């Protein structure tokens, strides 16, 4: 499976393109539509912006308005077309969940009655657009239903705007097997790898939902088994599922220091590729600050003798530190 965040962006981009194709019909011009769609995707789903405003909708509208002004300045003879395309985007904010909409039918009636939009619509446009919008909303709901699971859930520990997660199971297993046997099987290499991939998919779905709700601030830390470094085809599949700028910044792959000593080159390569990586210091850590700045997060445990040294050297380490508390939210 490819990266589901990327798939979702393609799905949304395709809807936006068809939205304009239906409304503009033969007057559709890619050069006056695509820049609006690209800007919307960047701001809406990747939180990329130039305009400074605490209110997201204000920021998004100003970004699109500034783009419209630039396009009009460069194409003054087509000012009316560009203004129409900009005006049509105000309805997308409701359709795509930026703003609350209680009734899609009323929204679309308002669109077609909007006198600021100087477009003459063909007879079939209203029914075609209503079908497109309802189909988009239905498929969005179906998409998220795919990731609902009654068998698996995340055990979580929150540290501010970061959550350390571990995938647990609540499958019905025959009483013929002891808890020891079940736990041993669940923590076998192949199962750990498979549940890592499932964790990536479930977390990706959660991140998409949060982005839709305009939440760009919460990150997740999950274990990444070093056994995958020995399995080239498999690790390519796993990393491909995370290969999106938003996921790379929000889903952080965690490694223990003892594994980092062995797979230093592989882990550094992930960092160079833009993946978010955290390092959990353990009993093998030798109080060497040289590499720590590279990581998105450093995980510390108070039980180790070097804890106070690290905490008192925050200015030298220059990265985010998390002090683990309570039972570690993962299997050893």
Image (cartoon, rainbow, N blue to C red):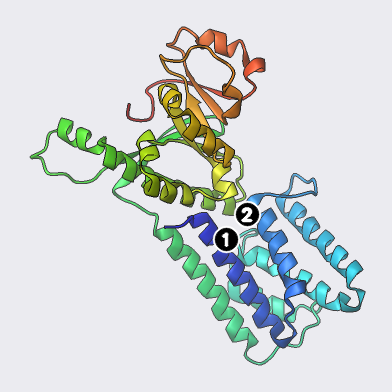
Horizontal arrangement in the rendering, residue 80 relative to residue 14 (left or right) = right
Q: Vertical placement of 246 versus 155: above or below?
A: below
Dot label at residue 199: none
Q: Dot 2: few (<14), some (14–19), or many (≥20) neighbours within 10 Å? A: some
- Residue 28 location, x and y as percent? 72, 81
| Rendered image quadrant of residue 331 | top left
Q: Dot 1: few (<14), some (14–19), or many (≥20) neighbours within 10 Å? A: some
Q: Quadrant of the C terminus?
A: top left
Horizontal arrangement in the rendering, residue 29 relative to residue 307 (left or right) = right
Horizontal arrangement in the rendering, residue 249 relative to residue 47 (left or right) = left
Give 23 or 315, whichever is nearer the viewer: 315
Horizontal arrangement in the rendering, residue 327 relative to residue 309 (left or right) = left
Asked whether residue 106 appears in the rendered view, the answer is no
Name the secondary structure under disc 2: helix
Asked whether residue 10 appears in the rendered view, the answer is yes
Give 245 or 118, whichever is nearer the viewer: 245
- Residue 330 location, x and y as percent? 36, 30
Image mark count: 2
Name the secondary structure under disc 1: helix
| Rendered image quadrant of residue 173 | top left
The residue carrying mark 2 is 45
- Residue 165 location, x and y as percent? 42, 36
The residue carrying mark 1 is 9
Q: Quadrant of the N terminus?
A: bottom left
Give 304 or 177, whichever is nearer the viewer: 304
The reply to whether callout 1 and callout 2 are in contact (CB within 8 Å) is yes
- Residue 305 location, x and y as percent? 46, 7
Q: Residue at x 51, y 30 (%)?
A: 278
Q: Residue at x 21, y 33 (%)?
A: 184
Q: Vertical placement of 303 versus 251: above or below?
A: above
Q: Residue at x 53, y 50 (%)?
A: 243
């Amino acid at each position: 499976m490819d990266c589901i965040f990327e798939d979702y962006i393609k799905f949304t981009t395709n809807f936006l393109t068809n939205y304009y194709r239906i409304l503009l019909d033969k007057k559709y011009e890619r050069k006056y539509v695509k820049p609006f769609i690209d800007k919307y995707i960047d701001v809406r789903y990747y939180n990329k912006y130039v305009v400074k405003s605490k209110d997201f909708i204000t920021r998004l509208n100003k970004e699109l308005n500034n783009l419209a002004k630039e396009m009009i300045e460069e194409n003054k003879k087509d000012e009316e077309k560009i203004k129409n395309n900009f005006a049509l985007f105000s309805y997308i904010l409701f359709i795509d969940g930026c703003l609350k909409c209680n009734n899609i039918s009323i929204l679309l009636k308002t669109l077609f009655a909007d006198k600021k939009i100087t477009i003459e619509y063909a007879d079939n446009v209203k029914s075609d657009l209503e079908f497109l919008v309802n189909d988009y909303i239905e498929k969005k709901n179906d998409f998220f239903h795919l990731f609902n699971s009654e068998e698996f859930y995340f055990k979580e520990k929150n540290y501010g705007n970061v959550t350390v997660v571990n995938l647990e199971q609540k499958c019905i297993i025959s009483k013929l097997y002891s808890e020891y046997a079940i736990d041993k099987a669940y923590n076998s290499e192949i199962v750990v790898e498979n549940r890592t991939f499932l964790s990536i998919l479930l977390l990706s779905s959660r991140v998409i939902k949060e982005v839709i709700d305009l939440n760009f601030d919460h990150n997740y830390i999950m274990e990444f088994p070093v056994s995958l470094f020995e399995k080239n085809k498999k690790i390519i599949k796993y990393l491909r599922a995370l290969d999106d700028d938003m996921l790379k910044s929000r889903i952080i792959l965690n490694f223990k220091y003892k594994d980092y000593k062995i797979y230093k080159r592989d882990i550094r390569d992930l960092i160079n590729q833009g993946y978010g990586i955290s390092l959990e210091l353990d009993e093998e850590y030798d109080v060497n600050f040289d590499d720590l700045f590279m990581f998105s997060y450093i995980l510390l445990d108070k039980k180790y003798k070097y804890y106070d040294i690290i905490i008192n050297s925050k200015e030298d380490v220059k990265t985010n530190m998390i002090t683990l508390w309570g039972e570690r939210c993962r299997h050893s």
